[in-house]
Image (cartoon, grey):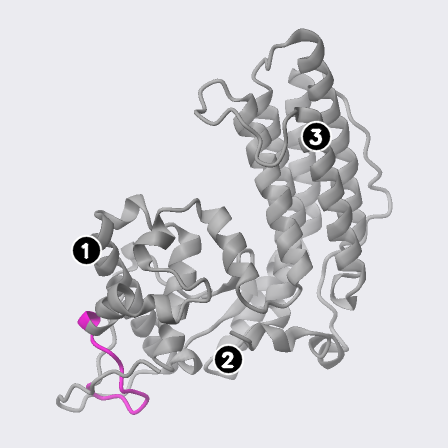
Amino acid sequence: MYQASRIGGMSSPRPNTVDIEQGLLELFRRGLRDAVQNEVGPPEKKLDSIRTHKLVLCGIREFDLESQVTTQWYLDGDMLPNLPSENDGVTIVTNAGFDEGPFPSRQEVRDYYLEDLEDSIPTEETLSRILEQDAFKWLKKYYSAREIPFSEVYQTNLEIYLRLQNFQKYLNPDDQCQELTGSTTPENIANEISDATERMKEALIEHALFQSIPPYVTEFNRTANQILNRISEDIKKEGDNEEYYKLVSHLSRFYYKAVWQPIADRIGYYTVSAPSDQKEKETREYRTQNLQLAQGEFFDELNQLRDKAREFDIRFEVRTERLPRFNPEESGLEEVLSLDIDAAEAS
């Protein structure tokens, strides 16, 4: 385990847990940015949200400080829901006046990312190697390198999202990438998306946690099939993309906001680990609010997609009459938590 030196100082009033958490997260965020600046230049060009969360969390674990921060599994796997942004003006934590340390210095955090990251990151890669890859493709590698809860759900989500992204790039005349990874034709990519969506539904059905989700995945698959097959047919006949990439972009948003986010909100609700009961409660309440709005969000996104499709003279059918609500269960929490959440703590 990477060890930090204790910095002496005058005692000061002890802040509450939230202050410690924010200061600690800011310490690692700044140390990481310092390392990225040293390695590849301006961090804002290379350090996206996905890698920031994974690398900050990896550093916090390596310094044995995970009990001081709130974690949960969410949209992109294990994440830090309280990670401050660069504009929040949070002061980094030091050892003066705290019993919870020792905390590392900003220099020690920077040196860890530059010199020791490869030995502790699940993918066993240096910082520069991690930063040179596509974020979502690196995330797929990260998932494969460690045990994660609901692995098949996370993996199929990435496959669906990457296939939609590649389809969109293929259609975009301004995009340098004119190839579909793992596919040769739009018809193939449409079939792969459909297959991945079916696998996701099968994975969701295995867990009581997701009992309200499969009908939404079914309707996404039905919608995607109709839109992508129509686009594929038109391209085959006309040989013209006709800016269809804009429609696929809307389809990707519909999937991410209306289908994947409610799945991730449910995972997040049941996988929160926080330094205090109050912080755990607050984080769960936030996920509950999202879930209570999720059904309305689904219909809002669906209507926006429908409007966009009409611009291309495309109509599609959905069956929304019996879609259930997304709310988390108010009872039986312990039973749900006992399913396979324990894997979330494996590294």
Instruction: Give residue 287's quadrant in the image.
Output: bottom right
Depth check, mark 3 against mark 1: the one in front is 3
Can residue 146 be seen here? The reply is: yes
N-terminal label among 2 and 1: 1
Residue at (73, 45) in percent of width and height: 197
| The magenta segment | 96-107
Residue at (21, 53) in percent of width and height: 37
Q: Which residue is mark 2?
A: 278
Q: Secondary structure of the magenta portion, mostly?
A: loop
Instruction: Give residue 62's quadrant in the image.
Output: bottom left
N-terminal label among 3 and 1: 1
**Cα–Cα gap, marks 2 and 3:** 49 Å
Q: Which residue is mark 1?
A: 38
Q: Which mark is residue 200?
A: none
Q: Secondary structure at mark 3?
A: helix
| Image side of residue 288 versus residue 126, left or right | right
Placement of 153 over or under 109, stated as above or below: above
**Cα–Cα gap, marks 3 and 1:** 43 Å
Could you say where residue 136 lies in the image, as x and y percent from the top left?
50, 48
Could you say where residue 159 lies in the image, as x and y percent from the top left?
62, 46
| Image side of residue 229 versus residue 91, left or right | right
* 251 inside magenta stretch: no
